[in-house]
Amino acid sequence: MSKEHINVYTEGSTGVIQLNRPKVANALNRKMVDEIVEQMEAFDRDETIRVIFIKGNEKAFAAGADIEEMMDDTPLSLEQLDPFAVWDRMMLIKKPIIAGVNGFALGGGFELVLHCDLIVAAEDAKFGFPEVNLGVMPGAGGTQLLTKAMGRAKALEWIWLGQPMGAQEALNYGVINRIAAPELVEEEALRLASQLSKQAPVSLRLIKEAVSEAVDTPLNEGLTLERKNFYLAFATQDQKEGMKAFTEKRRPSFKGV
Ligand code: CO8
C-alpha cells in the first residue's frame, strides 16, 4: 500500500501513515503532501478504519517544507501551483487524526502536526517555525493555527524568534495533548486510537465538526451547529445502542451507522 514518500499500513482499525524521506529529515516536498492527503482521504472513506495515525521516524517527524524544492519559487509560480489547496483538503477529514511526534516537527512539519486533532510527543521532541531564519514565514496555516492554540503573544514570540519549543512547553500551552518517553510515543498514540475506535464513529465526527467550529465562529453560530449535530446523533443506531447499553448495564457495541 506504500507510496513513494510515505509508508501506509493498518493496526486494527487504525490507518497508519509514516512519513518516509529519512535522508532529508522527512522534509515535505509537494508530492509527499499530496500522498499524505490522498491517503488521509482514502482512510476517511474506508469503513474499516476508525482513526488515522501519522508519524515520522525516531529522529524527525518532519523538518519542514523541502527547501531545495522551494528555493526558486516566485510569487507567480506559487500562485499557479496553488500548493496550499491540498492542505485545505486536510481540514475536511472527518475521522480523528492523531500525530505521534519524535524528534523535530519544524515549519511545514509543525503545520502538519497542527492540522491533526490529537498530538502525542516524545518528551525530547522539538516544535518550531524556523521560516524567519530563511527570510520567509509559515505558509500552511502556522500563524493562524498556533495563535489559536496558544494565544497571540506567545505565538508571535515563537514565530518571530524562530526557536524551537520543547514538548513540555508545548504541553503547558495546550498545543499538544500528551508527552511520552520517546520509545513509547507510538504505543501511547495507538492506545489513544484504540480508545477512540471504541467510541461511536458518528458521534466522533459530529463532535470534531462542532469543536472545530468553536475555534472560528461566534458563540451563537457554534451553538446552532452543536444543536444541529446533537439532533443528528439521534438519527443513528449507535445512539439507540449506546443508551440501551447504559440502561442494560453493559458495554455498547458501536457500528458507525
Ligand atoms: N528541506 C530540505 N532538506 C532538508 C530540510 C528541509 N526542510 N531539513 C533537513 N534537510 C536535509 C539536510 O539538508 C541534510 O541533507 P544532506 O545530508 O544531504 O546534507 C539532511 O536533511 C539532514 O539534515 P541535517 O544534516 O541538517 O541534520 P541535523 O540533525 O544536523 O539537523 C534539522 C536537523 C534541525 C532539522 C536541520 O536539518 C534543519 O534546521 N532543517 C531545516 C529546518 C527548516 O528550516 N524548516 C523550515 C522549512 S520552510 C517551511 O517549512 C515553510 C512552510 C510553508 C509551506 C509548507 C508546505 C509543505
Image (cartoon, rainbow, N blue to C red):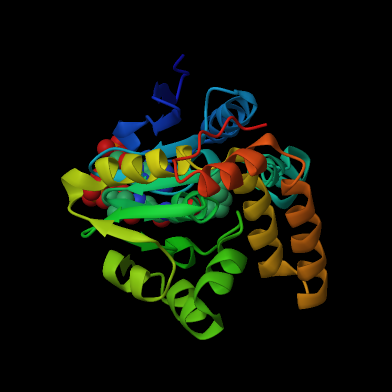
Quarter-of-image position of residue 145: bottom right
Q: Nearer the viewer, residue 45 or 227?
A: 227
The percent coordinates of residue 131 (x first, y second) are 48, 61
User: Residue pushed farthest bottom?
Assistant: 153
Task: For the C terminus, give its image quadrant.
Answer: top right
Answer left or right for 99 relative to 74: left
- 67 or 146: nearer the viewer: 146
* 62 horizontally vs 114: left or right: left
Q: Is residue 131 above or below residue 78?
A: below
Q: Residue at x 25, y 41 (%)?
A: 187
Can you tell which quarter of the image residue 18 is in?
Answer: top left
Q: Examine the rendered structure and indicate whether residue 129 appears above or below residue 150.
A: above
**In this view of the protein, can residue 73 be seen by the observer?**
no
Residue 136 relative to residue 170: left or right: right
For the point 27% across and 59% down, the residue is: 179
Q: Position of residue 184 (x, y in %)?
A: 20, 45
Camera-side residue: 123 or 112?
123
Nearest the viewer among 135 and 174 is 174
Q: Residue furthest top?
A: 1
Residue drawn at (71%, 62%) of the image: 213
Is residue 4 visible to us here?
A: yes
Q: Is residue 47 above or below residue 222?
A: above
On the image, the x and y values in percent for residue 160 come to 48, 76
How many numbered marks does the figure carry?
0
Q: Position of residue 104 (x, y in %)?
A: 31, 52
What's the residue at 52%, 38% (across, down)? 69
